[in-house]
Amino acid sequence: MQLISFIIPCYASEGSVALVMDEIRSVVAQRPEFDYEIIAVNDCSPDGVWQVLCAQADQDPKVKAINLAKNGGRHNALICGCHYARGEYVVLIDDDQQCPCDRLWDLMAPVESGAYDAAFARYPKKTQSALKNFGSKVNDLVSNWLLEKDKDLKFSNFTVMRQFIVQEMIRYQNPYPYISGLIHRATSRIANVDMEERERTIGVGHYTFKKSFALWMNNLTAFSVKPLRLATTCGVLCALIGVIMALYTVIHKLLNPAVAAGYSSMMAVILFLGGMVMFMLGLIGEYIGRIYISLNNSPQYVIRESRNLREVGKDREFQ
């Protein structure tokens, strides 16, 4: 019997996460050759999610509940769950019922066939605000450039992968994991499966602009030095523009001595060059800051308590 590990990052979902687990059970029951385990990670949620997870774990020993001591975001919660996933197949799914869990077997089909190592759901229409749709498109363009992924490949919140991908992902020890980037770094055999994202029926979204920007920065700085190379290119271009403008000013003054020095043009050049310098310094500072935090061994997550959890490859069990 093959095992499927479902990893659910939980935040402000006390009304929906149990329903997601019930749907997982009913879907897996359709194919008796598969068994399941559910690893639910409470990302320091402010509501009663932990009590719900404990009740589920007490009723079903296949549910592993993890309570984190500090909110680190969806990707940190997922990487935590990956450390304890034992299944041949590992499924990442959200806690809000928006992932079409009933399409699990369609999502797994490319991976089961052996043709692919991972598969992402692809939603032709996303059930989110226009601002978030715009942010998703920007993030996708950045991913295409930094990760050099196929522009037709779309990342999403409903994912299945083989166990060896998970083992490669958990080798990443830095405190800023970006799950889609880690998967893409491990394999190029990734499929998309088209399906419809569900409407949210319980609760509201909690992915704020701050969290979205932090994720975008992870994408921008975690897996490539291309932004630094872009900074170098911009610096060279600004220097060339400065030289050209200086030559133009000198020649123009020699040809027409009556021309007064232009205050507006001077201020425009200063503001442009000053803005570019500050932007480049900020980008370099972001890299240096992340290097500093990584060298300090800042943890990806800290487990406060758990239920039914045994560390993979070790005898110690969290209580």
Image (cartoon, rainbow, N blue to C red):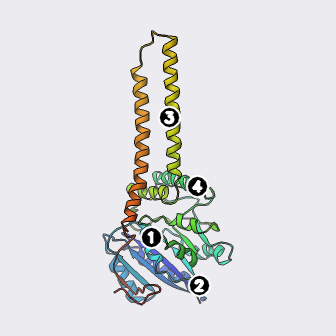
Q: Earlier in the sequence, mark 1 or mark 2?
A: 2
Give the number of marks.
4
Horizontal side of residue 57 vs 171, given as left or right:
left
Q: Which residue is mark 1?
A: 173
Q: How far apart are the alpha carbons under marks 3 and 2?
A: 65 Å
Q: Is residue 151 above or below residue 53?
A: above
Horizontal side of residue 208 vs 231, given as left or right:
left
> Of tags 4 and 1, which is closer to the observer?
1
Q: Amino acid at mark 3?
A: Ala
> Of tags 1 and 2, which is closer to the observer?
1
Q: Is residue 257 above or below residue 195?
A: above
Asked whether disc 4 touches disc 1, contact meaning CB atoms under 8 Å apart, the reply is no
Q: How far apart are the alpha carbons under marks 1 and 3?
A: 39 Å
Horizontal side of residue 200 vs 194, given as left or right:
left
Q: Amino acid at mark 4?
A: Asn
User: Which is nearer the eye, 80 or 119?
Assistant: 80
Tag shown at residue 30: 2
Return the x and y of residue 243 as percentages of the image width and height: 51, 29
Horizontal side of residue 295 vs 128, given as left or right:
left
Q: Which residue is mark 4?
A: 144
Q: Earlier in the sequence, mark 4 or mark 3?
A: 4
Q: Is residue 93 above or below residue 132?
A: below
Q: State which quadrant residue 140 falls in.
A: bottom right
Asked whether disc 4 touches disc 3, contact meaning CB atoms under 8 Å apart, the reply is no
Q: Amino acid at mark 1?
A: Gln
Asked whether disc 3 touches disc 2, contact meaning CB atoms under 8 Å apart, the reply is no
Return the x and y of residue 34 as percentages of the image width and height: 58, 86
Q: Which residue is mark 3?
A: 239
Q: Please, what secondary structure does the residue beneath circle 3 have?
A: helix
Q: Is residue 256 visible?
A: yes
